[in-house]
Amino acid sequence: MYIKIVLLFLFIISCSNIDGLNYPSDILEIKEVVLERSDSNSNGKFAEIKQLNNNQVKQLLATLSKAKQIDSKNFDEDFQIIFSTESGTKRIMVRGNKIKNFESNKVYQIPNVDYLNNF
């Protein structure tokens, strides 16, 4: 019985980690942040890439920390935010002021950010 309780607890923890918004929150571990928009006419090649400067990365991290989960059944990606870190790459899909992880089905709403809205 004890093993079943432990396994259930571990399962709940693993599910909660998958569904959360996953991005590097420490600016010191981030090497680079880029915005990438794929071109539907070229089978996934990137049509537009923008590298964010240090001030934009700080603003983005502050904005992501204010993300609120919303109900959204449809999510059509407009572009991606790609974080490059020492431990790997994290991607967030963006559509207007709504964001979503690749690993999660949950959609979050963030405050408007000029350089995200104008990309």
Image (cartoon, rainbow, N blue to C red):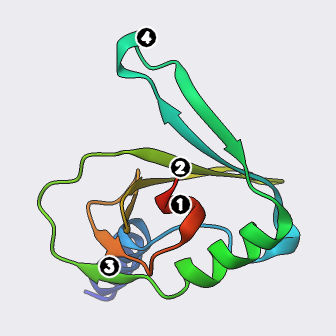
Q: Residue 12 carries which label?
A: 3
Residue at 68%, 69% in the rendered image: 24
- Give the answer, above or below, for where 51 lies relative to 18: above
- In the image, is 118 to the left or to the right of 41? right
Task: Count neighbours of disc 2 (C-alpha within 10 A) and say few if under 14, some if 14 to 19, many if 20 or more.
Answer: some
Q: Circles 2 and 3: CB distance less than 8 Å? A: no
Task: Count neighbours of disc 1 (C-alpha within 10 A) and say few if under 14, some if 14 to 19, many if 20 or more.
Answer: some
Q: Which of the two discs, 2 and 4, labels the residue nearer the N terminus?
A: 4
* Residue type at tag 2: Phe
Q: Residue 42 carries which label?
A: 4
Q: Tell me how far mark 2 sits from mark 1, CA to CA.
A: 5 Å
Coordinates of residue 75 in the picture (x, y in percent): 22, 53
Coordinates of residue 81 in the picture (x, y in percent): 57, 52
Q: Circles 2 and 1: CB distance less than 8 Å? A: yes
Q: Tell me how far mark 2 sits from mark 4, CA to CA.
A: 19 Å
Q: Between label 2 and label 3, give the one nearer the viewer.
A: 2
Q: Which mark is residue 116?
A: 1
- Secondary structure of the residue carrying tag 3 is helix
Q: Between label 4 and label 3, give the one nearer the viewer.
A: 4
* Residue type at tag 4: Ser
* Residue type at tag 3: Ile
